[in-house]
Protein backbone atom coordinates (compact mmCIF):
# COMPACT_ATOMS: atom_id res chain seq x y z
CA UNK A 1 0.00 0.00 0.00
CA UNK A 2 1.35 3.42 -0.91
CA UNK A 3 2.29 5.53 2.11
CA UNK A 4 0.66 8.94 1.78
CA UNK A 5 3.05 11.28 3.59
CA UNK A 6 0.98 14.37 2.81
CA UNK A 7 -2.06 12.93 4.60
CA UNK A 8 0.11 11.71 7.45
CA UNK A 9 1.59 15.15 8.17
CA UNK A 10 -1.83 16.79 7.88
CA UNK A 11 -3.25 14.43 10.51
CA UNK A 12 -0.20 14.99 12.67
CA UNK A 13 -0.61 18.76 12.56
CA UNK A 14 -4.25 18.46 13.57
CA UNK A 15 -3.53 16.13 16.49
CA UNK A 16 -0.72 18.23 17.93
CA UNK A 17 -2.71 21.42 17.49
CA UNK A 18 -5.58 19.93 19.45
CA UNK A 19 -3.13 18.79 22.13
CA UNK A 20 -1.63 22.23 22.54
CA UNK A 21 -4.93 24.08 22.52
CA UNK A 22 -6.33 21.81 25.22
CA UNK A 23 -3.44 22.41 27.59
CA UNK A 24 -5.81 24.52 29.75
CA UNK A 25 -7.49 21.31 30.86
CA UNK A 26 -4.34 20.48 32.80
CA UNK A 27 -3.85 24.08 34.00
CA UNK A 28 -0.67 24.32 31.89
CA UNK A 29 -1.44 27.96 31.13
CA UNK A 30 -1.61 28.92 34.80
CA UNK A 31 1.99 29.73 35.70
CA UNK A 32 2.88 31.97 38.60
CA UNK A 33 5.19 34.95 38.03
CA UNK A 34 5.30 34.79 34.22
CA UNK A 35 6.91 37.81 32.61
CA UNK A 36 4.10 39.90 31.00
CA UNK A 37 6.04 40.03 27.73
CA UNK A 38 6.48 36.26 27.76
CA UNK A 39 2.81 35.83 28.61
CA UNK A 40 1.92 37.99 25.62
CA UNK A 41 4.06 35.83 23.33
CA UNK A 42 2.42 32.69 24.69
CA UNK A 43 -1.04 34.12 24.09
CA UNK A 44 -0.16 35.20 20.54
CA UNK A 45 1.34 31.79 19.87
CA UNK A 46 -1.88 30.15 21.05
CA UNK A 47 -4.04 32.34 18.78
CA UNK A 48 -1.83 31.79 15.73
CA UNK A 49 -1.81 28.07 16.38
CA UNK A 50 -5.61 28.05 16.50
CA UNK A 51 -5.58 29.80 13.12
CA UNK A 52 -3.27 27.15 11.70
CA UNK A 53 -0.37 29.60 11.30
CA UNK A 54 2.23 27.28 12.77
CA UNK A 55 5.36 29.06 11.56
CA UNK A 56 4.19 32.38 13.02
CA UNK A 57 3.16 30.68 16.25
CA UNK A 58 6.61 29.12 16.49
CA UNK A 59 8.31 32.53 16.28
CA UNK A 60 6.35 33.68 19.36
CA UNK A 61 7.26 30.51 21.25
CA UNK A 62 10.92 31.15 20.37
CA UNK A 63 10.57 34.59 21.94
CA UNK A 64 8.84 33.09 24.99
CA UNK A 65 11.69 30.62 25.53
CA UNK A 66 14.29 33.35 25.16
CA UNK A 67 12.37 35.54 27.60
CA UNK A 68 11.96 32.84 30.23
CA UNK A 69 14.54 30.03 29.70
CA UNK A 70 13.60 28.31 32.96
CA UNK A 71 9.90 27.96 32.22
CA UNK A 72 9.20 24.30 31.34
CA UNK A 73 5.84 25.23 29.82
CA UNK A 74 7.32 27.43 27.09
CA UNK A 75 9.62 24.60 26.03
CA UNK A 76 6.72 22.16 26.00
CA UNK A 77 4.56 24.39 23.82
CA UNK A 78 7.41 25.05 21.41
CA UNK A 79 8.17 21.33 21.21
CA UNK A 80 4.54 20.61 20.36
CA UNK A 81 4.60 23.16 17.53
CA UNK A 82 7.84 21.65 16.24
CA UNK A 83 6.11 18.28 16.15
CA UNK A 84 3.11 19.72 14.36
CA UNK A 85 5.54 21.08 11.75
CA UNK A 86 7.11 17.64 11.37
CA UNK A 87 10.37 18.70 13.01
CA UNK A 88 10.81 15.93 15.54
CA UNK A 89 14.58 16.46 15.71
CA UNK A 90 14.02 20.01 16.87
CA UNK A 91 11.29 18.97 19.30
CA UNK A 92 13.36 16.43 21.23
CA UNK A 93 15.81 18.93 22.82
CA UNK A 94 12.83 20.96 24.07
CA UNK A 95 11.15 17.88 25.52
CA UNK A 96 14.43 16.88 27.15
CA UNK A 97 14.60 20.35 28.71
CA UNK A 98 11.02 20.04 30.00
CA UNK A 99 11.82 16.74 31.70
CA UNK A 100 15.02 18.22 33.12
CA UNK A 101 13.14 21.22 34.57
CA UNK A 102 10.11 19.24 35.73
CA UNK A 103 10.82 15.48 36.03
CA UNK A 104 7.30 14.72 37.25
CA UNK A 105 5.67 16.29 34.18
CA UNK A 106 4.31 13.03 32.75
CA UNK A 107 2.68 14.68 29.74
CA UNK A 108 6.16 15.70 28.50
CA UNK A 109 7.55 12.23 29.17
CA UNK A 110 4.63 10.67 27.32
CA UNK A 111 5.14 13.04 24.41
CA UNK A 112 8.86 12.32 24.32
CA UNK A 113 8.20 8.60 24.48
CA UNK A 114 5.83 8.87 21.52
CA UNK A 115 8.41 10.83 19.52
CA UNK A 116 11.17 8.36 20.36
CA UNK A 117 8.91 5.49 19.39
CA UNK A 118 8.05 7.11 16.05
CA UNK A 119 11.78 7.59 15.46
CA UNK A 120 12.37 3.91 16.16
CA UNK A 121 14.33 4.55 19.38
CA UNK A 122 12.36 1.89 21.17
CA UNK A 123 14.63 1.33 24.19
CA UNK A 124 14.56 5.02 25.09
CA UNK A 125 10.83 5.22 24.44
CA UNK A 126 10.22 2.28 26.78
CA UNK A 127 12.09 4.07 29.56
CA UNK A 128 9.75 7.06 29.25
CA UNK A 129 6.61 4.91 29.13
CA UNK A 130 7.80 2.95 32.17
CA UNK A 131 8.48 6.14 34.11
CA UNK A 132 4.98 7.41 33.30
CA UNK A 133 3.49 4.10 34.51
CA UNK A 134 5.50 4.33 37.75
CA UNK A 135 4.09 7.79 38.39
CA UNK A 136 0.62 7.09 37.00
CA UNK A 137 -0.15 3.35 37.26
CA UNK A 138 -3.56 3.86 35.64
CA UNK A 139 -2.19 5.61 32.53
CA UNK A 140 -3.65 3.32 29.87
CA UNK A 141 -1.83 4.97 26.97
CA UNK A 142 1.58 4.44 28.59
CA UNK A 143 0.70 0.83 29.45
CA UNK A 144 -0.46 0.11 25.91
CA UNK A 145 2.65 1.70 24.34
CA UNK A 146 4.99 -0.14 26.71
CA UNK A 147 3.39 -3.48 25.79
CA UNK A 148 3.88 -2.76 22.09
CA UNK A 149 7.61 -2.06 22.30
CA UNK A 150 8.88 -5.61 22.96
CA UNK A 151 7.19 -7.35 19.97
CA UNK A 152 8.23 -4.43 17.76
CA UNK A 153 11.87 -4.84 18.71
CA UNK A 154 11.66 -8.60 18.10
CA UNK A 155 10.14 -8.08 14.64
CA UNK A 156 12.85 -5.60 13.70
CA UNK A 157 15.69 -7.86 14.85
CA UNK A 158 14.19 -10.80 12.99
CA UNK A 159 13.78 -8.67 9.86
CA UNK A 160 17.48 -7.75 9.97
CA UNK A 161 18.46 -11.42 10.13
CA UNK A 162 16.15 -12.34 7.25
CA UNK A 163 17.45 -9.42 5.20
CA UNK A 164 20.97 -10.82 5.47
CA UNK A 165 19.55 -14.17 4.36
CA UNK A 166 17.89 -12.44 1.37
CA UNK A 167 14.43 -13.55 2.46
CA UNK A 168 13.08 -10.26 1.16
CA UNK A 169 9.37 -11.07 1.13
CA UNK A 170 9.53 -12.10 4.79
CA UNK A 171 11.36 -8.85 5.57
CA UNK A 172 8.61 -6.84 3.90
CA UNK A 173 5.90 -8.61 5.90
CA UNK A 174 7.76 -8.31 9.21
CA UNK A 175 8.43 -4.57 8.79
CA UNK A 176 4.84 -3.62 8.08
CA UNK A 177 3.86 -3.06 11.71
CA UNK A 178 7.15 -1.49 12.85
CA UNK A 179 7.03 1.08 10.04
CA UNK A 180 3.39 1.82 10.82
CA UNK A 181 4.25 2.57 14.45
CA UNK A 182 7.75 4.00 13.83
CA UNK A 183 7.10 6.08 10.68
CA UNK A 184 10.08 8.38 11.33
CA UNK A 185 12.62 5.55 11.48
CA UNK A 186 14.53 6.01 8.23
CA UNK A 187 16.55 2.82 8.75
CA UNK A 188 13.41 0.67 8.67
CA UNK A 189 12.13 2.36 5.54
CA UNK A 190 15.48 2.02 3.80
CA UNK A 191 15.64 -1.68 4.70
CA UNK A 192 12.18 -2.35 3.30
CA UNK A 193 12.95 -0.26 0.22
CA UNK A 194 15.99 -2.42 -0.49
CA UNK A 195 13.84 -5.53 -0.07
CA UNK A 196 11.33 -4.13 -2.57
CA UNK A 197 14.15 -3.29 -4.99
CA UNK A 198 15.52 -6.81 -4.74
CA UNK A 199 12.10 -8.08 -5.80
CA UNK A 200 11.81 -5.56 -8.63
CA UNK A 201 9.00 -3.62 -6.95
CA UNK A 202 10.49 -0.19 -7.65
CA UNK A 203 7.30 1.82 -7.16
CA UNK A 204 6.84 0.48 -3.63
CA UNK A 205 10.51 1.11 -2.90
CA UNK A 206 10.12 4.75 -3.92
CA UNK A 207 7.13 5.05 -1.58
CA UNK A 208 9.42 4.09 1.31
CA UNK A 209 12.37 6.23 0.23
CA UNK A 210 10.38 9.42 -0.36
CA UNK A 211 9.60 10.07 3.36
CA UNK A 212 13.29 9.68 4.23
CA UNK A 213 14.08 12.64 1.98
CA UNK A 214 11.97 14.79 4.30
CA UNK A 215 12.97 13.14 7.56
CA UNK A 216 16.72 13.45 7.00
CA UNK A 217 18.29 16.83 6.22
CA UNK A 218 20.19 17.15 2.91
CA UNK A 219 19.36 13.58 1.97
CA UNK A 220 20.93 13.57 -1.49
CA UNK A 221 21.17 9.78 -1.29
CA UNK A 222 17.37 9.48 -1.22
CA UNK A 223 16.85 11.72 -4.25
CA UNK A 224 19.58 9.90 -6.18
CA UNK A 225 17.99 6.56 -5.34
CA UNK A 226 14.49 7.71 -6.34
CA UNK A 227 15.79 9.17 -9.60
CA UNK A 228 17.57 5.92 -10.42
CA UNK A 229 14.48 3.83 -9.69
CA UNK A 230 12.23 6.05 -11.80
CA UNK A 231 14.83 5.75 -14.56
CA UNK A 232 14.82 1.95 -14.32
CA UNK A 233 11.04 2.02 -14.69
CA UNK A 234 11.33 4.17 -17.83
CA UNK A 235 9.90 7.28 -16.14
CA UNK A 236 12.41 9.79 -17.48
CA UNK A 237 10.53 12.96 -16.53
CA UNK A 238 10.12 11.91 -12.89
CA UNK A 239 13.74 10.75 -12.82
CA UNK A 240 14.83 14.18 -14.01
CA UNK A 241 12.69 15.87 -11.37
CA UNK A 242 14.21 13.86 -8.51
CA UNK A 243 17.81 14.28 -9.65
CA UNK A 244 17.28 18.03 -9.82
CA UNK A 245 16.24 17.93 -6.16
CA UNK A 246 19.55 16.24 -5.38
CA UNK A 247 21.46 19.00 -7.16
CA UNK A 248 19.49 21.67 -5.33
CA UNK A 249 20.87 20.25 -2.09
CA UNK A 250 24.38 19.82 -3.46
CA UNK A 251 25.17 21.40 -6.87
CA UNK A 252 28.61 19.72 -6.81
CA UNK A 253 27.31 16.21 -6.15
CA UNK A 254 29.28 14.23 -8.75
CA UNK A 255 27.05 11.15 -8.94
CA UNK A 256 23.87 13.22 -9.20
CA UNK A 257 25.43 15.54 -11.77
CA UNK A 258 26.52 12.67 -14.04
CA UNK A 259 23.10 11.04 -13.82
CA UNK A 260 21.42 14.38 -14.47
CA UNK A 261 23.34 14.89 -17.72
CA UNK A 262 22.39 11.44 -19.00
CA UNK A 263 18.70 11.72 -18.08
CA UNK A 264 18.43 15.23 -19.52
CA UNK A 265 19.94 14.07 -22.81
CA UNK A 266 17.63 11.07 -22.98
CA UNK A 267 14.53 13.16 -22.23
CA UNK A 268 15.38 15.46 -25.13
CA UNK A 269 16.00 12.56 -27.52
CA UNK A 270 12.71 10.87 -26.61
CA UNK A 271 10.76 14.11 -27.08
CA UNK A 272 12.40 14.74 -30.45
CA UNK A 273 11.76 11.19 -31.66
CA UNK A 274 8.09 11.47 -30.67
CA UNK A 275 7.76 14.79 -32.46
CA UNK A 276 9.40 13.42 -35.62
CA UNK A 277 7.06 10.42 -35.51
CA UNK A 278 4.00 12.63 -35.05
CA UNK A 279 5.03 14.90 -37.92
CA UNK A 280 5.68 12.00 -40.29
CA UNK A 281 9.45 12.63 -40.55
CA UNK A 282 10.07 8.92 -40.59
CA UNK A 283 13.70 8.77 -41.72
CA UNK A 284 14.75 11.33 -39.11
CA UNK A 285 12.65 9.46 -36.55
CA UNK A 286 14.62 6.28 -37.24
CA UNK A 287 17.93 8.12 -36.92
CA UNK A 288 16.87 9.70 -33.64
CA UNK A 289 15.69 6.36 -32.25
CA UNK A 290 19.10 4.85 -32.95
CA UNK A 291 20.70 7.73 -31.05
CA UNK A 292 18.44 6.85 -28.08
CA UNK A 293 19.84 3.32 -28.14
CA UNK A 294 23.37 4.74 -28.07
CA UNK A 295 22.50 6.82 -25.01
CA UNK A 296 20.76 3.94 -23.21
CA UNK A 297 21.13 0.35 -24.36
CA UNK A 298 20.51 -1.51 -21.10
CA UNK A 299 17.36 -0.13 -19.45
CA UNK A 300 14.63 -2.13 -21.14
CA UNK A 301 11.75 0.42 -21.06
CA UNK A 302 13.90 2.89 -23.03
CA UNK A 303 15.27 0.22 -25.34
CA UNK A 304 11.70 -0.89 -26.05
CA UNK A 305 10.54 2.65 -26.79
CA UNK A 306 13.46 3.29 -29.14
CA UNK A 307 12.83 0.05 -31.01
CA UNK A 308 9.12 0.89 -31.15
CA UNK A 309 9.95 4.20 -32.83
CA UNK A 310 12.13 2.34 -35.33
CA UNK A 311 9.43 -0.27 -35.98
CA UNK A 312 6.71 2.32 -36.62
CA UNK A 313 8.76 4.72 -38.70
CA UNK A 314 10.26 1.97 -40.85
CA UNK A 315 6.80 0.58 -41.52
CA UNK A 316 5.47 4.01 -42.46
CA UNK A 317 8.45 4.86 -44.68
CA UNK A 318 8.12 1.68 -46.73
CA UNK A 319 11.24 -0.04 -45.38
CA UNK A 320 9.33 -3.29 -45.33
CA UNK A 321 12.04 -5.85 -44.57
CA UNK A 322 13.64 -3.67 -41.90
CA UNK A 323 10.23 -2.95 -40.36
CA UNK A 324 9.30 -6.62 -40.18
CA UNK A 325 12.54 -7.37 -38.35
CA UNK A 326 12.29 -4.38 -35.98
CA UNK A 327 8.63 -4.94 -35.14
CA UNK A 328 9.25 -8.63 -34.49
CA UNK A 329 11.99 -7.64 -32.02
CA UNK A 330 9.59 -5.33 -30.18
CA UNK A 331 6.90 -8.01 -30.01
CA UNK A 332 9.42 -10.57 -28.74
CA UNK A 333 10.36 -8.18 -25.91
CA UNK A 334 6.77 -7.14 -25.25
CA UNK A 335 4.32 -9.74 -26.61
CA UNK A 336 1.30 -7.59 -25.82
CA UNK A 337 2.53 -4.51 -27.68
CA UNK A 338 -0.52 -3.66 -29.79
CA UNK A 339 1.13 -0.76 -31.66
CA UNK A 340 4.04 -2.93 -32.75
CA UNK A 341 1.64 -5.64 -33.94
CA UNK A 342 -0.27 -3.09 -36.03
CA UNK A 343 2.97 -1.64 -37.42
CA UNK A 344 4.12 -5.14 -38.33
CA UNK A 345 0.78 -5.77 -40.04
CA UNK A 346 1.20 -2.51 -42.00
CA UNK A 347 4.60 -3.75 -43.21
CA UNK A 348 3.08 -7.11 -44.17
CA UNK A 349 0.38 -5.29 -46.13
CA UNK A 350 3.04 -3.25 -47.91
CA UNK A 351 4.65 -6.58 -48.76
CA UNK A 352 1.25 -7.75 -50.08
CA UNK A 353 1.18 -10.54 -47.51
CA UNK A 354 -2.40 -9.81 -46.53
CA UNK A 355 -3.10 -13.19 -45.01
CA UNK A 356 -0.23 -12.83 -42.49
CA UNK A 357 -1.28 -9.25 -41.77
CA UNK A 358 -4.81 -10.39 -40.96
CA UNK A 359 -3.51 -13.10 -38.64
CA UNK A 360 -1.30 -10.58 -36.82
CA UNK A 361 -4.20 -8.17 -36.38
CA UNK A 362 -6.56 -10.88 -35.21
CA UNK A 363 -4.04 -11.77 -32.49
CA UNK A 364 -3.85 -8.09 -31.55
CA UNK A 365 -7.64 -7.97 -31.41
CA UNK A 366 -7.68 -10.87 -28.96
CA UNK A 367 -5.43 -8.80 -26.67
CA UNK A 368 -7.46 -5.58 -27.01
CA UNK A 369 -10.91 -5.95 -28.51
CA UNK A 370 -11.64 -2.23 -28.10
CA UNK A 371 -8.62 -0.90 -29.99
CA UNK A 372 -9.80 1.36 -32.78
CA UNK A 373 -6.41 1.25 -34.47
CA UNK A 374 -6.45 -2.55 -34.60
CA UNK A 375 -9.98 -2.63 -36.00
CA UNK A 376 -9.19 -0.02 -38.67
CA UNK A 377 -6.04 -1.88 -39.72
CA UNK A 378 -7.91 -5.19 -39.83
CA UNK A 379 -10.63 -3.70 -42.02
CA UNK A 380 -7.93 -2.31 -44.30
CA UNK A 381 -6.10 -5.65 -44.54
CA UNK A 382 -9.33 -7.48 -45.37
CA UNK A 383 -10.19 -4.92 -48.06
CA UNK A 384 -6.70 -5.14 -49.53
CA UNK A 385 -6.90 -8.91 -49.59
CA UNK A 386 -10.18 -8.67 -51.45
CA UNK A 387 -8.78 -5.97 -53.70
CA UNK A 388 -5.70 -8.05 -54.52
CA UNK A 389 -7.97 -10.40 -56.40
CA UNK A 390 -9.05 -7.51 -58.59
CA UNK A 391 -6.84 -5.07 -60.50
CA UNK A 392 -3.84 -3.61 -58.72
CA UNK A 393 -2.88 -0.17 -60.03
CA UNK A 394 0.65 -0.47 -58.67
CA UNK A 395 1.16 -3.73 -60.56
CA UNK A 396 -0.37 -2.25 -63.72
CA UNK A 397 2.30 0.46 -63.73
CA UNK A 398 4.96 -1.84 -62.32
CA UNK A 399 5.83 0.42 -59.38
CA UNK A 400 6.19 -0.16 -55.65
CA UNK A 401 3.44 0.87 -53.23
CA UNK A 402 5.65 3.60 -51.82
CA UNK A 403 6.57 5.01 -55.26
CA UNK A 404 6.65 8.79 -55.58
CA UNK A 405 4.38 10.70 -57.95
CA UNK A 406 7.38 11.34 -60.20
CA UNK A 407 8.13 7.61 -60.41
CA UNK A 408 4.47 6.85 -61.17
CA UNK A 409 4.29 9.39 -64.02
CA UNK A 410 7.57 8.12 -65.48
CA UNK A 411 6.29 4.53 -65.47
CA UNK A 412 2.97 5.61 -66.95
CA UNK A 413 4.55 7.54 -69.83
CA UNK A 414 6.84 4.66 -70.70
CA UNK A 415 4.00 2.12 -70.76
CA UNK A 416 1.59 4.51 -72.48
CA UNK A 417 4.04 4.87 -75.36
CA UNK A 418 4.34 1.10 -75.60
CA UNK A 419 0.61 0.38 -75.47
CA UNK A 420 -0.83 3.38 -77.28
CA UNK A 421 -3.50 1.99 -79.63
CA UNK A 422 -2.13 4.05 -82.57
CA UNK A 423 0.93 1.79 -82.51
CA UNK A 424 -1.08 -1.39 -82.92
CA UNK A 425 -3.15 -2.87 -85.76
CA UNK A 426 -5.70 -5.61 -86.13
CA UNK A 427 -6.44 -7.88 -83.14
CA UNK A 428 -3.58 -6.33 -81.13
CA UNK A 429 -5.29 -2.95 -81.26
CA UNK A 430 -8.18 -4.15 -79.09
CA UNK A 431 -5.75 -5.54 -76.50
CA UNK A 432 -3.77 -2.30 -76.55
CA UNK A 433 -6.93 -0.29 -75.97
CA UNK A 434 -7.73 -2.36 -72.87
CA UNK A 435 -4.20 -2.08 -71.49
CA UNK A 436 -4.15 1.63 -72.24
CA UNK A 437 -7.40 2.15 -70.32
CA UNK A 438 -5.93 0.29 -67.34
CA UNK A 439 -2.78 2.43 -67.53
CA UNK A 440 -4.84 5.60 -67.60
CA UNK A 441 -6.89 4.37 -64.65
CA UNK A 442 -3.77 3.59 -62.65
CA UNK A 443 -2.36 7.04 -63.39
CA UNK A 444 -5.66 8.68 -62.48
CA UNK A 445 -5.79 6.98 -59.08
CA UNK A 446 -2.14 6.99 -58.08
CA UNK A 447 -1.42 10.61 -58.95
CA UNK A 448 -4.45 11.88 -57.03
CA UNK A 449 -3.57 11.93 -53.27
CA UNK A 450 -7.16 11.44 -52.12
CA UNK A 451 -7.87 8.57 -54.53
CA UNK A 452 -4.52 6.94 -53.86
CA UNK A 453 -5.19 7.02 -50.11
CA UNK A 454 -8.56 5.37 -50.65
CA UNK A 455 -6.94 2.70 -52.81
CA UNK A 456 -4.21 2.13 -50.19
CA UNK A 457 -6.96 1.64 -47.62
CA UNK A 458 -8.45 -1.16 -49.66
CA UNK A 459 -11.05 0.74 -51.73
CA UNK A 460 -10.99 1.13 -55.51
CA UNK A 461 -12.19 4.69 -56.18
CA UNK A 462 -12.91 3.78 -59.83
CA UNK A 463 -14.91 0.64 -59.09
CA UNK A 464 -18.60 1.46 -59.68
CA UNK A 465 -19.65 -1.34 -57.33
CA UNK A 466 -17.89 0.51 -54.50
CA UNK A 467 -19.26 3.93 -55.49
CA UNK A 468 -22.78 3.90 -54.05
CA UNK A 469 -23.86 0.95 -56.17
CA UNK A 470 -23.05 2.63 -59.51
CA UNK A 471 -22.79 0.69 -62.79
CA UNK A 472 -20.97 0.90 -66.04
CA UNK A 473 -17.44 1.78 -67.10
CA UNK A 474 -15.67 3.46 -64.17
CA UNK A 475 -14.04 6.13 -66.30
CA UNK A 476 -17.22 7.28 -67.98
CA UNK A 477 -18.90 7.04 -64.56
CA UNK A 478 -16.26 9.39 -63.19
CA UNK A 479 -16.49 11.70 -66.19
CA UNK A 480 -13.15 10.47 -67.51
CA UNK A 481 -12.65 9.22 -71.11
CA UNK A 482 -9.09 8.69 -72.29
CA UNK A 483 -10.25 8.47 -75.91
CA UNK A 484 -12.22 11.72 -76.16
CA UNK A 485 -15.22 11.79 -78.57
CA UNK A 486 -14.82 8.56 -80.49
CA UNK A 487 -11.02 8.72 -80.81
CA UNK A 488 -7.75 9.68 -79.17
CA UNK A 489 -7.24 13.30 -78.36
CA UNK A 490 -3.45 13.19 -78.38
CA UNK A 491 -0.63 11.72 -80.44
CA UNK A 492 2.81 10.49 -79.36
CA UNK A 493 5.85 11.28 -81.37
CA UNK A 494 7.57 7.89 -81.51
CA UNK A 495 10.54 9.11 -83.54
Image (tube, rainbow, N blue to C red):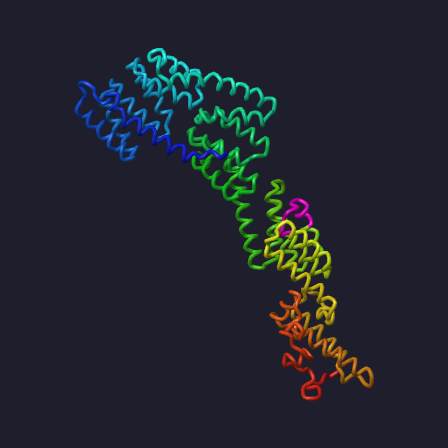
Q: Nearer the viewer, residue 388 or 282?
A: 388
Residue 332 in magenta stretch: yes
Residue 409 counted in the magenta span: no
- Could one spot residue 254 in this view of the protein? no
Q: Quadrant of residue 184?
A: top left
Residue found 59% across the figure and 54% down from its top: 371
Residue 342 lies left or right of residue 102; in this view the side is right
* Farthest residue, direction right: 427
The x and y percentages for residue 256 are 50, 36
Is residue 225 shown left or right of residue 20? right
Residue visible at 63% across and 73% down in the picture? 467
**What is the quadrant of residue 36 in the picture?**
top left
**Residue at x 66% of width, y 81% of height:** 476
**Left or right, 281 with reference to 488:** left
Report whether 112 appears left or right of 323.
Answer: left
Q: Residue at x 20, y 25 (%)?
A: 39
Q: Main secondary structure of the magenta part?
A: helix
Query: Residue 331: horizontal and vertical position, in percent?
Result: 67, 48
Residue 106 to residue 282: above or below: above
Query: What's drawn in magenta, residue-wise?
Result: 328-340
Q: Position of residue 324 (x, y in %)?
A: 70, 53
Quarter of the image with the C terminus in it: bottom right
Query: Of all residues shown, which one is farthest toward the bottom?
Result: 486
Q: Is residue 478 above or below residue 253?
A: below
Q: Position of residue 239 (x, y in %)?
A: 51, 40
Amino acid sequence: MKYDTTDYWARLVRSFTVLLLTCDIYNFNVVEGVNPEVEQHLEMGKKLLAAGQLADALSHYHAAVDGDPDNYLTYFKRATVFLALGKSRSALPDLNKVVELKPDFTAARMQRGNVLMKQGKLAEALMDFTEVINREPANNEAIEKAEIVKPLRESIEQAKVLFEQRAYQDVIVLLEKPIELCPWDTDLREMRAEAYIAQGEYFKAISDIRPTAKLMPDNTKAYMKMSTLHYQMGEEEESLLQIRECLKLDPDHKECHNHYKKVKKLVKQLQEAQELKNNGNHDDCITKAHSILKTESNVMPFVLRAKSFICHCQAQSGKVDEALKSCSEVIQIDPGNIDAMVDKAEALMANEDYESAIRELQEAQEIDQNSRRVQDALNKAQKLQKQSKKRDYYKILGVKRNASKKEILKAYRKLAVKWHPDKHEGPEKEKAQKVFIDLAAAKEVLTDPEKRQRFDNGEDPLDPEEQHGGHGNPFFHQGFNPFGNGGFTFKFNFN
